[in-house]
Image (cartoon, grey):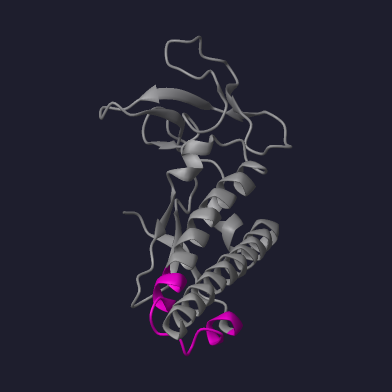
Amino acid sequence: MAKGKSIEIKGVPKLLKAIEGIEKGSRTIIRDAVNRTADGARTDSVRLIRQHLMLKAKSVRDNIRVVKGTKDRPVARLIAKGKKGLPLLGNYPVRPGRLGTRKPKEGVSVQIKKHGTRKILKGSFLAKMKSGHVGVFKREKGAKRLPVKQLFGVGFIGLMERGMIHRKLKKSINSRLEKILRQGINRLYHKNLQKVERLRG
């Protein structure tokens, strides 16, 4: 697994105080809340990133994973990998999009940003490596044939770490977590109240 950056999702302190005195069921509520919030945050991340980049949903989703929290450690983590971005071919709208197509003289064209324009990457070309991998490549400066380097898009880890996407993601995480925790706490209190009433009856 490639190294990545993570966002930790923990319980809301003021809500956790509300269930300090209730041992049975409280850990389950907290664990379920952070895990459900993490799943929702993954979905939000895909949506927010795709509002800025011309990436396929699967390309983003496959590079963001959720590490679930447990009863003993109710902290979920949202982990993104791919600091240098994803390969252009197969993830972004590239022209030409497959081998065998007539090679453009100027180079391969691609649109990276959602609200940007299609750009020609001068000197770039599609090629198949000995391993069988096909991608968009460019020769190293001064090289006539080899070495070549594969071209990548924007690393969306940076988008999740800072800026507008980061702020929106944190806001949605906090809002969703508080809502789910409140629902869980209400259910727990209602359940305990019913038990007390049955004992009294």
Is residue 105 within the magenta segment? no
Is 88 left or right of 166, judged from the image as shown?
left
Quadrant occupied by the N terminus: bottom left
Q: Residue at x 51, y 9 (%)?
A: 102
Question: Does 59 appear above or below 78?
Answer: above
Q: Quadrant of residue 130?
A: top left
Task: Tell which of 100 and 161 is nearer to you.
Answer: 161
Question: Does 40 appear above or below 144?
Answer: below
Question: Does 106 appear above or below 102?
Answer: below
Is 161 left or right of 128, judged from the image as shown?
right
Question: Does 43 appear above or below 195?
Answer: above
Is 90 left or right of 48, judged from the image as shown?
left
Can you name the residue that lies furthest to the front here? Answer: 201
Q: Residue at x 56, y 15 (%)?
A: 104
Give residue 162's position: percent from left, percent from top. 63, 63
Can you name the residue that lies furthest to the left here? Answer: 131
Is 108 left or right of 175, judged from the image as shown?
left
Task: Tell which of 69 and 168 is nearer to you.
Answer: 69
Q: Is residue 55 visible?
A: yes
Region rendered in magenta: 14-31
